[in-house]
Structures are given as C-alpha cells and as structure tokens.
Image (cartoon, helix red, strand yellow):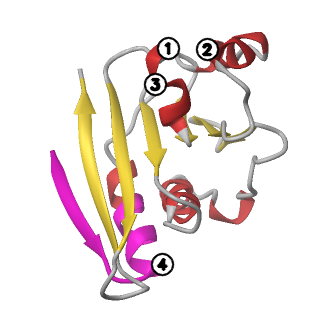
C-alpha cells in the first residue's frame, strides 16, 4: 500500500496524470471516498495524460462515459446509482474490463465481481485542512 497527500485539486490532477503513465488496456482502478473527495479530479488527471482532459463529464446519470484518443479506450464509470451488481451485469459493464482502462467511481459497490488484479484508491478528506486529501493506493491481487 502507498499513500499520497494531495494539497489541492491541481496536486490530485498531477498525481493522477503521472499515475496514468503506467496504465494499460485491461487495468481497473476503483475510486472510493465520500462526495467531493477528489475522485473525479483524479479521473481528469488520468484523461490529461491521454490528452483527453477537455472531454471529461460526470457519468452519474449515464453510468459510463467512454473516451478514446484513437489508441487507448478509457471507460469512466460512476456506479453510485446502481441497485446491485446484477444491474452492472445487465448493462454489460463487465464487457468493458478487457477493452480498455476502467476507472470506477464508487467501485466498492461492485468490488466482489471485479476481475483481479485491480488497483483501489481511497480518497479521504483531511480534518486539519479542507483542501488536503489522503490517497491510499492498494493493489488487490
């Protein structure tokens, strides 16, 4: 497990952009944390690495947004509104796993059906500074 302290939104974006340099097709990243903790900013940073940062929109009502730069497919899920894992299967969510990089906000809700290995990043707001976030990065084997 690794930890990273982000001091502001730009820090989170920069960290994610660097993190994204190691990503490849089939990688699954689970993003957990309360509302406003930086999950979507992290996705923005990943997209920035692939020159897609101007494309980002929240998938809250569509469940998944698809991005491509012509080389890499990135799937940005927000599974907060799903009733259960069956609903994820019904929408064909599992078919995305091997076709690109999957970034799953609120992914803890479907962790029991995710293929391993995947990376889980937990975002926690600081109690001392409202701009600080602690990111805990864990590889799940």
The furthest residue to the left? 1
Query: Residues under labels 1 and 4: Cα distance?
Result: 31 Å
Which of pointers 1 and 4 indicates the residue nearer the eye? 1
Q: What label sits on residue 113 in the rendered view?
A: 1
Query: Residues under labels 2 and 3: Cα distance?
Result: 12 Å
Q: Does residue 7 belong to the magenta stretch? A: yes
Query: Residues under labels 1 and 3: Cα distance?
Result: 5 Å
The furthest residue to the bottom? 129
Q: What label sits on residue 94 in the rendered view?
A: 2
- State if disc 3 and disc 2 touch (CB < 8 Å): no
SS class of the residue under badge 4? helix
Q: How many residues crowd around disc 2 within 10 Å: few (fewer than 14), some, or many (20 or more)?
A: some
N-terminal label among 4 and 3: 4
Q: What label sits on residue 111 in the rendered view?
A: 3
SS class of the residue under badge 1? helix
Tell me the residue that label 4 is attached to: 9
N-terminal label among 2 and 1: 2
């Amino acid at each position: 497990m690794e930890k990273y302290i982000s001091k502001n939104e730009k820090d989170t974006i920069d960290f994610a952009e660097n993190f994204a340099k190691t990503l490849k097709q089939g990688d699954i990243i689970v993003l957990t944390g309360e509302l406003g903790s930086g999950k979507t900013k992290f996705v923005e940073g990943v997209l920035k690495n692939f020159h897609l940062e101007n494309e980002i929109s929240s998938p809250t009502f569509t469940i998944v947004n698809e991005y491509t730069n012509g080389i890499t497919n990135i799937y940005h899920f927000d599974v907060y509104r799903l009733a259960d894992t069956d609903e994820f299967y019904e929408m064909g969510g599992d078919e995305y796993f091997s076709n690109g990089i999957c970034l799953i906000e609120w992914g803890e809700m479907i962790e029991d059906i995710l293929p391993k290995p995947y990376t889980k990043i937990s975002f926690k707001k600081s109690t001392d500074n409202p701009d600080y976030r602690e990111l805990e990065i864990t590889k799940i084997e």
